[in-house]
Image (cartoon, coloured by chain):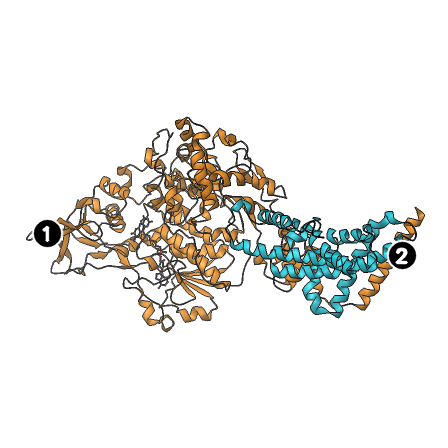
Chain colours: A orange, B cyan
Amino acid sequence: MLEATLVMLAIGGVCGLVLSIASKIFYVYEDPRIAEVEGFLAGANCGGCGYAGCSAAAAAVVAGKAPPSICMVAGLESAIKVAEIMGLDPGSAEPMKSVNECLGGVRADDKYFYNGAPACAALAALWGGRRVCTIGCLGLGDCIRACRFDAIEMGPEGYPVVDEARCVGCGVCEKVCPKNIITVRTMSQRLLHFNEEDDALAPCRQTCPAEIDIPKYIGQIREGDYEGAVHTIRERNPLLLTCGRVCPHPCEDYCRRGIVDEPVSINQLKRFVADYEMNSGKRLPIPCAPETDKKVAVVGGGPAGLSCAYFLRRLGHRVTIFDAMPELGGIARYGIPEYRLPARVLDWEIQGILDLGIEARCNNKLGRDFTIASLRREGFDAIFLGIGAWSDYRLRVEGEDLDGCWQGIKFLSKVAAGEKVKVGPRAAVIGGGNSAIDCVRTLVRLGVREVYLVYRRTRKEMPANEVEIEAAEHEGIKFIFLAAPVRVIGDENGRVTHLEYQKMELGEPDASGRRRPVPIEGSETLLEVETVITAIGQRPDVSFVEKDPDLAKLKVTRWNTIDNDPETLQTSIAYIFTAGDAATGASLVVDAIGGGRRAARSIHQYLNGEPVKGSPKSLRKRHIPESLFDDVPGVVRSKRTPMPELPVEQRLDSMVEVDLVISEKDALYESGRCLSCCRLCYNRETEQQENQGAGQDGSSEDAGRELEEATA
Amino acid sequence: MTDLIVLAISCILINNILLAQYLGNCPFLGTSKKMETAVGMAMAVVFVLVLAGVITWIVDTFILKRWDLEYLRTIAFILVIASLVQFVEMFLKKSIPALYAGLGIFLPLITTNCAVMGVCLINIKEEYNFIQALVASFAYAAGFGLALILFAGVRERILLARVPRPLQDTSIGLITAGILSLVFFAFKGMV
Ligand SMILES: Cc1cc2nc3c(=O)[nH]c(=O)nc-3n(C[C@H](O)[C@H](O)[C@H](O)COP(=O)(O)OP(=O)(O)OC[C@H]3O[C@@H](n4cnc5c(N)ncnc54)[C@H](O)[C@@H]3O)c2cc1C
Ligand code: SF4
């Protein structure tokens, strides 16, 4: 024993001595930061970072080849410390977090029907998951077993729940999930994710131009987690109060519930949680990525500009908004009238966005108060143009400049700005879109006794939202269909006295599929009115382009919109991006918001010096055909919650808001109507099997087919 | 001479340390994703293994055997190999920076590699003389490199293939390793 100890001591001593001498002789200067950095890495030598051990990783960090957040075990604090040592902006130290995209649908009890394949991966390979949608959580917990940090556990609903505090963002769960359901991303990456072909997307979510995760927030409302729902919406849409009020909700047209009874009232639910936050008296905190030193100028503070600014700010960039008008909001403030979207609500919403640390310079018009060159001189690295479509189309008829004639946006923005506008006791509005309806309903509220809406085609062809047309009807607007104005007639003082129009009849369908109205000879009619408003559409006012030598290369289309790459929204000048009405022509608020986010993504890439490119599998409002299943068995019919509104007699002589928010009880009921499409994994299949009455045997054939699919 | 060649061949192919003796599997899977890394690792193993084989043989013959301390073999070898690798690392860093740049990062990974330890112990167990131990160490290391580089080549090709998602990465790696191992079984009985 003594011998052994002595020998070992001797060997150890010799080794130690040799090494210590060697370290003197062979001393090489090494960046001391490497040792410092290594001190903050986990020391596990696990190789998970892709480098051969911690010291190699530390060397790579010091050499600038790896980000400070490289160590997947040590976590955020270490990343921040490492970033400090390196004097790096900790932007790259934003933590990765795992999120389960699928919050479980209506889960059947027969989850373990597939005996013998207790792992998601095996099940996916063998059966394709046996689901209708190609995506959806299988709930067998491969991710739970894979996580080495115990950050995932099976929740009570049967789908895995991630404990954010424990998640280190190592990404194993993402690797083992056979369904692309669990993903590990930074917040920035999540904010910049666009709907892709392989995502778990409900039909409504595929349709939403802002790509909000609709079933997720409805699910959160169902569980009473209203704050969670607000967060979910804000990941995609910063203007939830606005959209909750004015959005024509294209998503509801695709709602699968609509096949059996009526679509889920998605937008009212959005409004419910948005109002819940506003009325709660406090603002939910909105996290932003660590500051960068990049500056972006957002020209135009409408929905597109606000959305772009909001996302860029959350990505850590410094943003300044320039707007020509005295206040931000664009058409949402100066076009959409008070009774639909009260200024108070819009103010609250915009303040929340500015509170993230965005500077706003109002009364600042591009082309008048500043130029592209002056922005560049001020140090803005990229510019976003969200100037909207503010130039009204003209009728091109005689007398349209007489006293008493207005153009839609001019009229609405004057009223919205609180200026006195002189209108006669009778008025006619020309047009059939939302702006025309907004004009007539505003006129009624200004005390005009007789308001006519003059439209070339019939009610069926009116592009305005159905609910808006109905509301106008309730408010006593007189519709004159199939009528084309030919002349405005004035008295000797140049004041409007009549509108002359010609009656029309419907002829052959035109390119758009609508029957083209043709004039009836000799049918000219005089309408006695003192005010005539034309609201037949708008286009962007791009007069500043010609005046600005820096914009000589900016391409403008023949519709006066600013030309851009449809995927990246970059214009013909690399540092200028555009979205919203300025790029698309008159469209919807929610389109402008989606565009703002897409532009923010490209600008972010541009600022980081990466190539500006879209995501290859981006859907851009296209649908995934197999997810649009056309039968929903087993749904018990239930009525859609009606929109509560102010009675007509109370709303006519004031600008008070007409549409009201639904009650909490109704919200809970309505959210319960959602089918959680593309999250529902098992029910439908079971039903089929029961119908076949064959159990496992009956499905062996398509099991083979799905196996082929899974391996193809 | 023929003996030594036969020994070398059997160490490289028949008793391949990775595919027949299943030692050193973590660098086998860990550093075989890229050919470049695999080559670096293979060279580092050759380098360290030859040195370690020789030194441990000397330690065993002249120290442990002399004082009948064979039971200390494992722990003594660990100590010696670890110090050796550290020493080599320092030496390379100073004297042959180019070689260090190529091998350096792999050296610490081999410190506690079971393939290295295994070969040193086999040398002793088979009662090789000095020359045989030298040849065997080199040949085992060469076998390690051969298997690793072959495997890395296969894995690079697999990256291009469409592997079903559940089988990707390590999973398909293990399957491939198994098949490679079966292939090496064909050498059994050659000598
Ligand atoms: C009357 C009316 C009613 C509508 N109702 C609805 C509805 O109910 N639901 C719906 O979804 N959509 C509706 N829309 C459409 C919707 O309002 C627009 O699609 C949306 O506002 C477009 O947003 P944007 O940011 O692109 O442009 P805008 O909202 O037009 O904002 C552009 C901003 O840029 C500023 N700007 C312009 N030129 C300059 C310049 N040279 N320098 C600096 N700043 C400049 C403007 O002041 C403005 O603030 C309606 C539109 C109108 C006209
Ligand atoms: S039922 Fe729910 S998930 Fe399905 S389309 Fe309608 S709102 Fe979306």
Q: Is residue B20 left or right of residue A663?
A: right
Disc 1 residue type?
A: Leu
Q: Marks 2/1: CA distance?
A: 122 Å
Q: Are marks 2 and 1 on the same chain?
A: no
Q: Which residue is mark 2?
A: B62
Query: What is the chain identity of the residue bearing mark 2?
Result: B
Percent coordinates x, y for residue A414 in the rendering: 29, 55
Q: How many marks?
A: 2
Q: Residue at x 76, y 60 (%)?
A: B2
Circle 2: element type: helix
Percent coordinates x, y for residue A570 in the rendering: 40, 62
Which-is-in-front pick, marks 2 and 1? 2
Query: What is the chain identity of the residue bearing mark 1?
Result: A
Circle 2: is it few (<14), some (14-19), or many (20+) Cα within 10 Å? few
Q: Is residue A448 left or right of residue B138?
A: left
* Mark 2 Cβ and ligand 2 under 8 Å apart: no
Task: Compare residues A206 and A520 and report the one nearer the observer.
Answer: A206
Question: Is residue A272 at least partly visible in the picture?
Answer: yes
Disc 2 residue type?
A: Phe
Question: Is residue A319 at least partly visible in the picture?
Answer: no
Residue A560 position (above or below residue A661): below
Circle 1: is it few (<14), some (14-19), or many (20+) Cα within 10 Å? some
Task: Compare residues A137 and A163 and report the one nearer the observer.
Answer: A137
Q: Residue at x 75, y 66 (%)?
A: B92
Percent coordinates x, y for residue A379 in the rendering: 48, 68
Q: Which mark is residue B189?
A: none
Q: Are marks 2 and 1 in contact (CB under 8 Å)?
A: no
The image quarter containing residue B147 is bottom right
Q: Quadrant of ligand 1?
A: bottom left
Q: Which residue is mark 1?
A: A526
Task: Compare residues A701 and A313 and report the one nearer the observer.
Answer: A701
